[in-house]
Image (cartoon, rainbow, N blue to C red):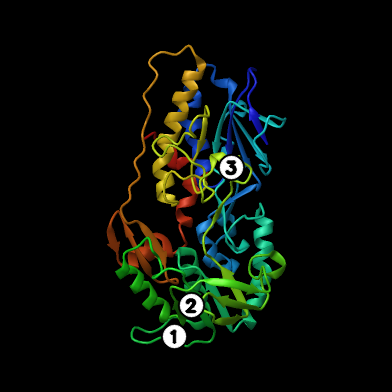
Amino acid sequence: MATPARSDAQRNILVLGASFAGISTAHYLLKHYIPKLPNSSSYRIVLVSPSLHAMCRQACPRALISDHFFDQSKLFVSISDQFKQYPKENFLFLQGAVTAISTTETVAFHSLIVATGASTPSPLFGFNSGDKDSLRAGWEPFRKALPSAKKIVIAGGGPAGIETAAELGEYFNGRAGLFSKSKQNVEITVVCGAERILPALRPGLANKAEKMLAKLGVTVVKSIRVFELEPAGAGEDFDKLTSRATIRLNNGQDIDADLYIPATGAQPNTSFLPSHLLGADGRIMVNSQTFRVPDIARLYAIGDCSAAFRPAVHNIAAAIPTLAANINRDLLIAEGTQTNIPDDREFKEDTRETQMVPIGTKGGVGAFMGWAFPSWAVWLLKGRDYWLWTTPALWSGKQWNKAS
């Protein structure tokens, strides 16, 4: 897909991936650094994505059930429309999938930022196959299968699995009263390989979440993993999204399901990169303070594809100014004529407990910077619409109007 730039007038700053990290990086550079570079008209941000649209991926656990929960014009937005505010010579959007970084043709780059994110085991949770239409093509048969489902199994005790279980529990079984469980019309089971669900949160909050799930008719089994599926690919392949499945567990037990949803984690979208750049988990090895890939000039990685920090939206938001500042520094050095080059900026991850997990439409569990939040606060900040209220400023770049 890309090759190091030749010594011509056009300097392409290639950003691979147009989700939170990629779009934010492009906006930040265009707002605060590109206009100030020497010969600024020769620098062009080239944003590459398989999809013409960006979406609030965090909303998928609720959105996959029905279109009625969200305004679709806010859930999916045109990427190119978000960048019409910038001079044409400074920005180009390309729809396409990256297949390799090579010495053959396609898009030459002066700098390269890899922000390709990660793909989920289930195609219900994002643009695994590239675009809005493919995502909705998975939602359609899933929604048609819901009315006849009596047993649903979800693999994964992280936020995606727990949120999906809660949304389906409330959808099928209704909300419980203050001192009672909901009526269990559909049997929903979460299979969690860890000793507890939501491992990024303290045990007390994980236990609270489990009790809230129980009131929605959701059963959680822990310290057990999915060993095998029959048929293979159930819940993962598009043609088997709604296949009845037998889930074989590593304790020898079998569970039958009308619908099986794997939510066991995401795989970094890094297969196009040479293996020596990747860690054992497939993420790109970078300097966690500067986001540079070691020993390769002007190559950076950020977001779920990068090993710089725990994949989380708040970490990405905090890292964008540092990444952009270091890209700017390297561009000035490459000019070769500049004095007073700014020093590196260094990022330090805030490792305090921060995660919010809605449990249905009325509450949830979570913490921010080490402080536990009450259920109503989780609803207010995330549970109402899964962060959709924050995305207009993010996609349009208004979130980055001020340099930080």
Is residue 171 visible in the rendered structure shown here? yes
Kind of residue at badge 1: Ser
Q: Secondary structure at mark 3?
A: helix
Which quarter of the picture shows residue 205? bottom left
Q: Which mark is residue 170?
A: 2
Lower position in the chain sequence, tag 1 or tag 3: 1
Left or right: 19 as drawn, with respect to 341: right
Q: Find out whether the residues at labels 1 and 2 contact each other: C-beta distance under 8 Å.
A: yes
- Mark pair 1, 3: CA separation: 50 Å
The outermost residue toward the left is 371
Q: Secondary structure at mark 2?
A: helix
Q: Is residue 65 visible?
A: no
Residue tagged 3: 275
Question: Of 237 and 393, which appears nearest the observer?
Answer: 237
Q: Secondary structure beneath disc 1?
A: loop
* Quadrant into which the C terminus falls: top left
Question: Where in the figure is residue 32, as x and y percent of width and height?
Answer: 45, 29
The quadrant in which residue 273 appears is top right
What residue is pinned by disc 1?
182
105 relative to 223 in the view: left or right: right
Which amino acid type corresponds to the residue marked 3 in the rendered image? Ser
* The N terminus: image quadrant: top right
Dot 1 or dot 2: first in sequence order is: 2
Residue drawn 66% across the image and 46% down it? 50
Residue 266 percent coordinates (x, y): 54, 57
Amino acid on which disc 2 is placed = Glu
Of tags 1 and 3, which is closer to the observer?
3
Is residue 45 or residue 204 the one in the foreground? 204
